[in-house]
Structures are given as structure tokens and as C-alpha cells.
Image (cartoon, rainbow, N blue to C red):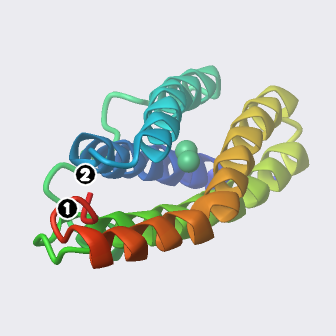
Amino acid sequence: METKYLENWLRDAHAMEKQAEEMLEKQAERLVDYPELKARIEQHLNETRHQSDRLEQAMAGLDIDTSALKDLGGKITAFGQALGGMMMGDEVMKGSIACYAFEHFEIANYKALIQAAESAGHTGVAQVCKEILQEEIAMADWLADHLESTTTQFLHRADDDDQRAKR
Ligand code: MG
Ligand code: FE
């Protein structure tokens, strides 16, 4: 089985995780008045850093050169813009929505990667991706479970105290 796509997709996944790390860092450092959300984002930030490491190990195991991994520094994407932009007063909501979407983007990527790895007979790589997939699903589920309550909290605080609603 052709492994060119598996290799490319692993590199893409690594770049995706670097972008995730940047997004989550920004979101975590910005959040003040949503401690539960902040804590969950910090937890996933740690998981995300470990995901990059595990992908690098998986790539090294396939003899993929990891020294030339794409550096996404400064590269702004659509997701990055949702978080990296100006203070519009509702960044907790913009951030929650962007993170929710991004986790689903990750889920789709890992599902494809798992199939590619299994098709190529690289069960160890598939296993790594399955473990990461579970972390992405857990984060997506958490965000899904909390999006409404975050929104309600945000709107209540917006009525109450304009500043404290924001982040
Ligand atoms: Mg991830
Ligand atoms: Fe994630």
C-alpha cells in the first residue's frame, strides 16, 4: 500500500497540533472569568503538546525526517483569526466556537489517518492516532456540553457588568 499519503497526513497532523497549541495558549491566557473553561483548555493544551511529541515519534518510526517539519509560526489561518483578532467584547464566545470547530477538524483528520495507517499495516501508528482521537473526542464533547452554559453565563454577565462578561 502506498504510504505517501500516510506520511503527508502525519506531517499535516503535526502542523495542525502546532496550530492547536497556539490557539489554546492564546485562549487560556486570555480567559479570566471562566475558570472551568480555562482549566479544561489548559488540560487540553498539555494533551496537545504531548500529541505533537507522539506524532514525531510515530514519524521517526516510519523514517520520516522530522527535522524539516513545517513551522507554522506567524501563519494565520481562518481558525487562528477567530482567536487572534481584536478584542470584540465576546472573545470567550468566539474562542469557544472556534475551539469546538477545531476539535471536530482534528477528529476528522485522525479518523482518516487511522484508516491510512491501518491500510498500510502500520498498526503502531494507528494506535497512536486512536489514542489522540480519544482526547480530541473528549475535548469536543466537553465543549459541546458547556457551550450553552458558557453562552448563558456570558449573556447574563453582559447585562450585569460589561467588563467581566468578556473573558
Ligand atoms: Mg490535537
Ligand atoms: Fe484537540
Frontmost residue, 70 versus 19: 19
Q: Which type of secondary structure does the marked residue at label 1 adopt?
A: loop
Residue beneath disc 2: 72
Q: Ligand 1 appears in which quadrant? A: top right
Residues at circles 2 and 1 in contact by the CB criterion of under 8 Å: yes
Tell me if mark 2 has few (under 14), some (14-19) or many (20+) residues whose alpha carbon lies within 10 angstroms of its own: few
Q: Position of residue 125 (x, y in %)?
A: 75, 32
Q: Can residue 2 be seen here?
A: no
Amino acid type at image mark 1: Lys
Label at residue 75: 1
28 left or right, relative to 142: left
Residue at horizontal 89%, vertical 50%? 119
Q: Where is residue 112 in the image (x, y as percent from the top left)?
A: 75, 60
Amino acid type at image mark 2: Leu
97 left or right, relative to 120: left
User: Image quadrant for the C terminus?
Assistant: bottom left
26 left or right, relative to 47: left
Q: Can residue 52 be seen here?
A: yes
Residue at horizontal 63%, vertical 27%? 58
Question: Label 2 vs label 1: CA separation?
Answer: 5 Å
Q: Which type of secondary structure does the marked residue at label 2 adopt?
A: loop
Frontmost residue, 11 versus 145: 145
Frontmost residue, 105 versus 137: 137
Residue at horizontal 49%, vertical 23%? 53
Tell me if mark 1 has few (under 14), some (14-19) or many (20+) residues whose alpha carbon lies within 10 angstroms of its own: few
Report which quarter residue 122 is drawn in: top right
Q: Where is residue 95 in the image (x, y as percent from the top left)?
A: 37, 64
